[in-house]
Image (spheres, rainbow, N blue to C red):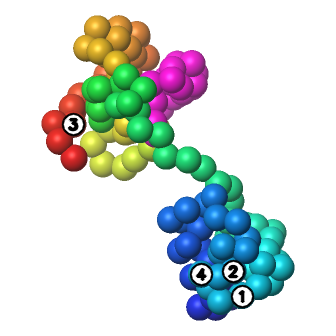
Amino acid sequence: MLDNTDMRILNELSMNSRLTMKELGEKVHLTGPAVSARVAKLEDQGVIEGYSIKVNRVKLGCFIHAYITIITQSTYHQPYLSFIKNQEKHIINNYKISGEGCYLLECKFPSNEILNDFLTALNEHANYKLSIVIDK
């Protein structure tokens, strides 16, 4: 069971996972070694699964943010999943969903031309509905 200090550690790490153990300890009022032991315990328990960075894809040249609802033709989804695995540079998330559609793709593309090429190739494996993000 997580206590208040563990929850504060998780909150601080979710805001900045690059904190040193000393800095983190200061924020949650523990010594560096004490907070390090708690973080290690949270990792061992699987509460902390990993650390990541958030990339600004617009600054990398990917200006088109799209959500694509995927509708597969059959219950055999492997051709679609294999296609998606080879398109990782454009895909942020591939969610398996209930409701309308089978999957929801979140993607970023540098141009309409590349988006169109992606959709043409995708159409060999599934039907889709496209939504473009206008503003956040």
* Drawn side of residue 80 relative to residue 97, left or right: right
Residue at 51%, 23% (x, y): give it.
89
Measure how far apart labels 3 and 2 are at the Cα level. 40 Å
Residue identified by numbered label 2: 25
Mark 2: which amino acid? Gly
Mark 1: which amino acid? Leu
Q: Nearer the viewer, mark 3 or mark 2?
A: 2
Residue 129, image x and y in percent? 24, 29
Q: Return the disc, 3 or 2, that comes first in the chain's sequence.
A: 2
Residue identified by numbered label 1: 30
Mark 4: which amino acid? Lys
Residue identified by numbered label 4: 27
Q: Which region shows up in magenta?
A: 74-93
Q: Return the disc, 1 or 2, that comes first in the chain's sequence.
A: 2
Query: Which quadrant holds the N terminus?
Result: bottom right
Q: Secondary structure at mark 3?
A: loop
110 lies above or below 4: above
79 is within the stretch colored magenta: yes
Measure how far apart labels 1 and 2 are at the Cα level. 4 Å
Mark 3: which amino acid? Val
Measure how far apart labels 4 and 3 are at the Cα level. 37 Å
* Drawn side of residue 73 relative to residue 3, left or right: left
In the drawing, what numbered circle is on residue 60? none
Q: Secondary structure at mark 4?
A: helix
Residue at 35%, 31% (x, y): give it.
58
Q: Answer yes or no: do the residues labelled 1 and 2 have beta carbons within 8 Å?
A: yes
Q: Answer yes or no: do the residues labelled 4 and 3 have beta carbons within 8 Å?
A: no
